[in-house]
Image (cartoon, helix red, strand yellow):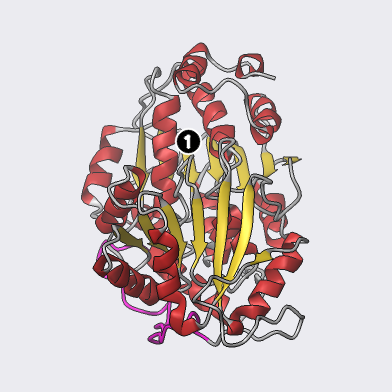
Amino acid sequence: MSFDSLGLAPALLRALADYGYTQPTPIQSAAIPPALEGHDLLAAAQTGTGKTAAFALPLLHKLSSSGQTMTRRPRALVLTPTRELAAQVHENLRDYGKHMHVSAATIFGGVSMGPQINALRRGVDIVIATPGRLIDHMQQRTLDLSAVETLVLDEADRMLDMGFLPALKRILQSVPKKRQTLLFSATFAPAIKTLALEFMHNPREISVSAPNTVTTLVSHQVHPVDVSRKRDLLLHVLSQDSRRQSLVFSRTKHGADKLVTYLNASGMRTAAIHGNKSQNARTRALSDFKSARVTVLVATDIAARGIDIEQLPMVINFDLPSVAEDYVHRIGRTGRAGMEGLALSLVSHDESGLLHDIRKLLKQDIAITPVAGFEPSAPLRLDAGAPRPKQGGGGQRQPRQGKPFNSPRPNGSSTQGRGERAAGNQRRRSNHRPAAKA
């Protein structure tokens, strides 16, 4: 199957050809035809499968074919869990729609509302937003959702994890009932099904792969190491090729900052991206990483959403994630576009239980390879009763997090940061992904 056979507008096919895209991915082949027909979709799609194009292409086709672009009110709304993902979706929409007269604006926290308000007043066709900042605009009556014809919920499972269910329900009740809704999620968890039944009309279910599957292009490897020597081993690994782009995951924001300080002092070009960084700093770090001005990006799980590098050769887990499913999301950043990738984890003895959970989830062994000079003082345990790190993890002493939903908020700030903190606290309290509550 080719994009030509999907019934997309010529302007979209021209843009796809400009970027060398000729064959749709499985999720695109499955989702685009029913979306073009106007059906609601409940689609299971992992990061890195081409899901953005699966909703962006039919969305742009619908807007351009109606001949009613550039109205004062947005006709499409895309909701994402994080600012980085919102920016990435905006970039993709701009690329695919470059031969069309369709306008889009991003609405997220961490930056002034003024430019967003001005863009909305000028009129846009598509709004890409995080739930928290969108609610801010709704409260200040700077955004009118009454003309929305298409609603997209991207990574709905993560939005629920981040505590956005009340905000989602409020937004869903504010858009017209007569609309098309496209919901993309990594899993069809019960909370997702409930949301779909409540706000969607006979949705078509699409699932092109089993949940928590990973591409065969990614190789997995573990280096066992004592906590006290993790940073030195990380520097040793990165120094093997200082020009190679590497994405390093830290379990905590404080730990990420300490890693950046250490690596920069050692001569590596490093930047961090996490929820305590200003939006300008996050945008600059991601841009520098994409352009190779920095070769190492240290990120936390939630802030890493929206990092889309087609040829990222290596992802390093400095700390294993507290939730095994997040390992799949992390390593989904490598092994894309037919390129091979390496998922490397630096695992201390007290993370043995987390490694056991990941191996169980993947249903496969992961090669455990000690590095000469960094052999651990105690071997890893791979049984069900293996130890797990205490709160903070990774050998980093962490300050207590504040109450995420009760702390005061400066005027014009978004609830986005509160959701991110809530997710971090929620993960530390449990070793499984809890169901969202209203």
Residue 413: where, in percent of width, then height?
30, 63
> Residue 206: x, y in percent?
73, 40
* Percent position of residue 113, x then y: 25, 52
Relative placement, left or right, of 339 versus 101 is right
Q: Give the residues in magenta.
A: 391-415
Residue at 49 percent of width and 17 percent of height: 17
Q: Is residue 422 visible?
A: yes
- Which residue does the image show at 42% across and 43% down from the upper left? 88
Type of amino acid at the residue the image marks with label 1: Ala
Residue at (72, 53) in percent of width and height: 211
Asked which secondary structure carries label 1, the reply is: strand
Residue closer to the observer: 371 or 118 = 371
Q: Quadrant of the C terminus?
A: bottom right
324, 177: nearer the viewer: 324
Corner quadrant of residue 109: bottom left
Determine whether, in the image, residue 57 is placed left or right of residue 324: left
Residue pictured at 55% horizontal, 87% vertical: 390
Q: Is residue 401 magenta?
A: yes
Quarter of the picture holding the N terminus: top right
Report crowding for label 1: few under 14, some 14 to 19, many 20 or more residues within 10 A (C-alpha): many
- The residue singled out by tag 1 in the image is 76
